Image: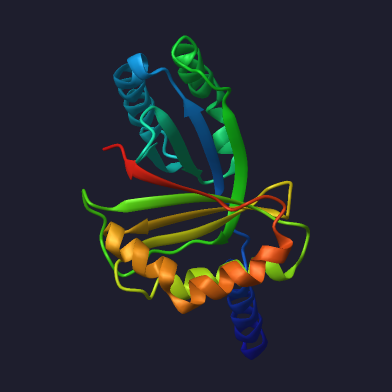
Amino acid sequence: MAKKLLLLFVLVMSGRAFAQTAPDTTFYSVSYIEVKPSARLNAIATLKGYRDLIHRDPANIGLGLFEQADRPGHFAIVETWKTQAAFDASTPQHKQLQDVLESMRVSAWDTRPYKTLTVASGTNEASAKTVYVISHVDVTPDPKIAGMLSALATASRLEDGNVRFDVLLHTMRSNHFEVIEAWQSQKALDNHAAAAQTRKYREDIQASLGSPLDERIYRAIE
């Protein structure tokens, strides 16, 4: 009897250990598209309709729509799915969106696949004044970069006014990252830019950059 109980205990604990170390299968798609100024409102309506459609899929975790603050008609679409297979299964909906926007767009679709490096919320809630920053970080291969970005994310989430600070890693290129930030206000973002850890990160990463940091400021499309 004692041996059976011991075996059961071992099996239970092994199952718990496996659950704790299960890999993160979350898949992210980040897309960029630019449309004609005359088509901006129609494009926004189309993107909202797409978001409503995707939200009905139980495998979709979230879909954020953003427009560049100083460049109307320049959009970013950030999709979060439970798995890449779930995202792939939604290909017909993506194709339908692209077909509808075909006559409106003035740029090609730029869609990139990502997985989690570090994702967590800050200490504040989003509002109508929230400022979003989406940055593409392209560096020469260096294993230290992921650690630098993770450390920056951890420190930034503790700053006043931070709503979100996520770092995504390209699924096929280990030297490409996407950084998604959200700040309660422009002032909070300005304070973050001037913070010691932010300046140190930019100085430390400079030598590894394959291209200038591509930081773009957005507003959410509600």
Residue 120 occupies quadrant: bottom left
What residue lies at 66% left-to-right and 81% top-to-bottom? 7
Drawn side of residue 202 relative to residue 99, left or right: right
> Residue 149's spot in the image, x, y percent?
58, 67
Residue farthest along the left direction in this orientation? 128
Q: Is residue 151 visible to the viewer in this orientation of the structure?
A: no
Question: Along the line of sight, which residue is nearer the eye, 211 or 218?
Answer: 211
Task: State the residue lying farthest toward the bottom.
Answer: 2
Give the percent coordinates (x, y) of residue 193.
43, 66
Identity of the residue drawn at 55% across and 35% down = 87
Query: Horizontal and vertical percent for residue 107?
Result: 54, 22
Residue at point 36%, 74% (across, down) = 159
On the rendered image, what quadrant is the C terminus found in? top left
Of all residues shown, which one is farthest toward the right? 141
Is 97 left or right of 116, judged from the image as shown?
left
Number of residue marks: 0
Q: Quadrant of residue 2?
A: bottom right
Which residue is situated farthest in the top direction here?
A: 103
Q: On screen, 42 above or below 44?
A: above
Picture quarter containing residue 142? Answer: bottom right
Residue at image location 53% in from the left, 18% down from the top: 95
Color scheme of the displayed model: rainbow
Q: Quadrant of the N terminus?
A: bottom right
Residue 93 visible here: yes
